[in-house]
Amino acid sequence: MELDEVIITKAIIDRFCNKLIAHLETDVAIVGGGPSGLVAGYFLAGAGKKVVLFERKLSVGGGMWGGGMLFNEIVVQKAALPLMKEFGISYREFQKNYYTADSVESISTLTSRAVQAGLTIFNCISAEDVLMRTSRVTGLVLNWTAVEMARLHVDPLAARAKFVLDTTGHETSVVRLVQNKVPGKLKTPSGKIEGEKSMWSDNAESFTLRNTREVFPGLYVAGMAANATFGGPRMGPIFGGMLLSGEKAATMLLRALSSKSR
Ligand code: 48F
């Protein structure tokens, strides 16, 4: 049978539009497809929640692909090994408490397991603002990254979510948007983004986990964005904290979703 280009085109447009429409109202909308966002998405979807992830770039993975300085190996500490096992990512001991994994295997496995658990990912879409109702984040304002890059004057569209999770890494972009709209209202010591500090791996890993939490009503933060928001140091190419932070965010959001529905 001859392949028809118009049917191919219709198939893509139809499937994509239906997928997008189906995710305009979700339990959780995650912004940023780095390791912390993917892990959070995996656990939320696995718990049966409707969860969507928007990633600005063509590929998810954030800062994980390049390992450290483009050496494509990552390091994880012992505390994160249960998560490496949960996802089925191979790792090797380097020395006591230091384990290494191939960064390409790590990110591709996280992505595939998260999608198979039920996480829907939209790449090339950026969160350019949030929906807000009486001092609560209630969703995202979205645009094509291509529109953003070309600086075209094109209005965005919107998606509602019971909770938004900012996993945008160093940029901490969603929290930044909220800070710009309601200055001084974040749940941080100063009410503002505290800003990321210089590298201190050990401190940063525990700081990330401690500060994975709600930063504004309806808005949670995880991964490197948690450090930037609450003023923690950067950790360099050790990724255990990112995985654990994603898992903690999912646990907190599941709790928040169940108390919201009561
Ligand atoms: O930076 P990223 O990998 O976030 P993460 O999960 O992990 C941090 C580590 O990679 C590394 C580190 C730990 O060792 O220091 O940096 O905290 O991924 C963040 C993703 O968010 C996307 C961005 O393209 C990247 O893939 N992103 C940022 N802003 C937006 C966005 C936005 N406004 N809309 C959509 N995606």
Image (cartoon, grey):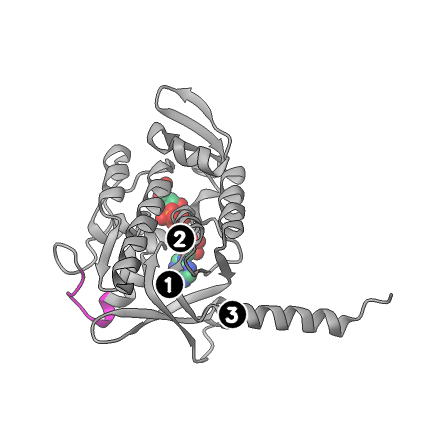
Query: Which mark is first along the chain, 3 or 2?
Result: 3
Q: Amino acid at mark 3?
A: Leu
The answer for how far apart the CA atoms under marks 3 and 1 are is 15 Å
Name the magenta segment's main secondary structure.
loop
The picture places residue 182, in percent across and down from the top left corner, at 20, 71
- Per the rendering, the mark at residue 20 is 3
Q: Amino acid at mark 2?
A: Leu
Identify residue for label 1. Answer: 27
Is 161 or 62 nearer to us in this picture? Answer: 161
Q: Quadrant of the C terminus?
A: bottom left
Q: Secondary structure at mark 3?
A: helix
| Residue shown at the point (50%, 59%) measured from the top left | 120
The answer for how far apart the CA atoms under marks 2 and 3 are is 19 Å
Identify residue for label 2. Answer: 44
In this image, 107 relative to 246: left or right?
A: right
Could you tell me if residue 233 is visible in this image?
A: no
Judged by depth in the image, the label closer to the viewer, 3 or 1, is 1
